[in-house]
Amino acid sequence: MPHFFINGGVNQGVNSGVNKEENPNTIQPPLITIKDTDNYRHIARSLRARAGEKLLLIDDKQIQYETVIKEITSKEIICEIQKSYPSKRDLDFDLYLAQSPLRSDSQLTIMEKATELGIREVFPVATDNCALKVDKHEKWQRVMYEASKQCERAKIPTCHELSTLSEVLDKDFDRIIVFAERSTEKSLKQYLRENPIKKGEKFLVIIGPEGGFSEREFQYFREKNLPLISLGDLILKADTAVITALGDIIYEYQG
């Protein structure tokens, strides 16, 4: 069932990469009327939807609506609500990622998979060995917006502008860990068994570039007393490391 946001394409002031027009959509049970340009074009023209087809809609209060299209006019789509309920496609702790962006399309994969894995915000950071020094956060935000629709997420994650490690670490987090392929103190499993994640916790994960963190950056992490955590004996590419790290954190938390 196709999934669409009906809050005007904007989530809590975050630029989703779509048109930020004032939200013209209305929810008046048992009907929802879709008038915003982006959703109308996608549903009516790209998907060529017809009356009788089902749509899954979600509003800015994180309520999902299972609907059936009643009518498509030249300007709006009228849907009838069959069922509504609070969205559950979310983690009950806040998972953040600070990551050194890659030059290839692998970065797009990272943004997509991080969204699927429940990330709340992504902080691209320019590290010493960073392959990409150009800010592309708007492009990455669009990828996260589309991925949110595909995996039925109510909250669209935020991709911030390219920044530095020190700027990110100045923000308020309950816990910060650094993944490193060498010079690590303990495995992720051991660390999380000793330090379980708490509900509602703000948890920042830091992952470096393909070339790894520099010695200067490792020294900086030590000065900040940040745990250096291993994903195991295998040496993983940066994009694989992101997916593995986030997946393992969720597994340990839910296990």
Image (cartoon, helix red, strand yellow):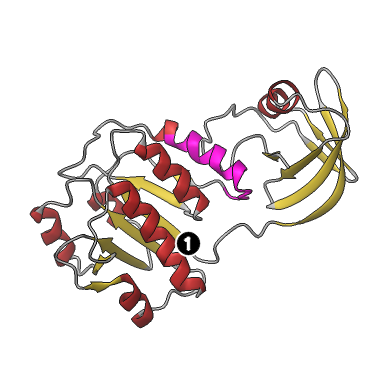
Q: Name the foreground residue: 90 vs 6.
A: 90
Q: Residue furthest bottom?
A: 194
The answer to whether residue 68 is above or below residue 64 is above
Q: Residue at x 34, y 51 (%)?
A: 240
The percent coordinates of residue 71 (x first, y second) are 89, 28
The percent coordinates of residue 87 (x first, y second) are 68, 56
The answer to whether residue 170 is above or below residue 32 is below
Amino acid at circle 1? Asp
Q: Residue furthest left?
A: 215
The local crowd at label 1, few if under 14, some if 14 to 19, many if 20 or more residues have their Cα within 10 Å, is some
Q: Which residue is mark 1?
A: 94
The percent coordinates of residue 189 (x first, y second) are 35, 74
Q: Is residue 48 magenta?
A: no
The answer to whether residue 19 is above or below residue 69 is above
Q: Which residues are magenta?
A: 140-155
Along the horizontal axis of the image, is 184 left or right of 97? left
- Quadrant, the N terminus: top right
| SS class, disc 1 | strand
Q: Residue furthest front?
A: 234
Q: Main secondary structure of the magenta part?
A: helix
Q: Residue at x 25, y 67 (%)?
A: 229
Q: Does residue 219 appear in the picture of this structure? A: yes
Along the horizontal axis of the image, is 227 left or right of 249? left
Q: Name the foreground residue: 71 vs 24.
A: 71
Instruction: Please give the count of numbered marks on the rendered protein.
Output: 1
Q: Residue at x 73, y 28 (%)?
A: 43
Q: Residue at x 32, y 70 (%)?
A: 188
The percent coordinates of residue 115 (x first, y second) are 49, 48
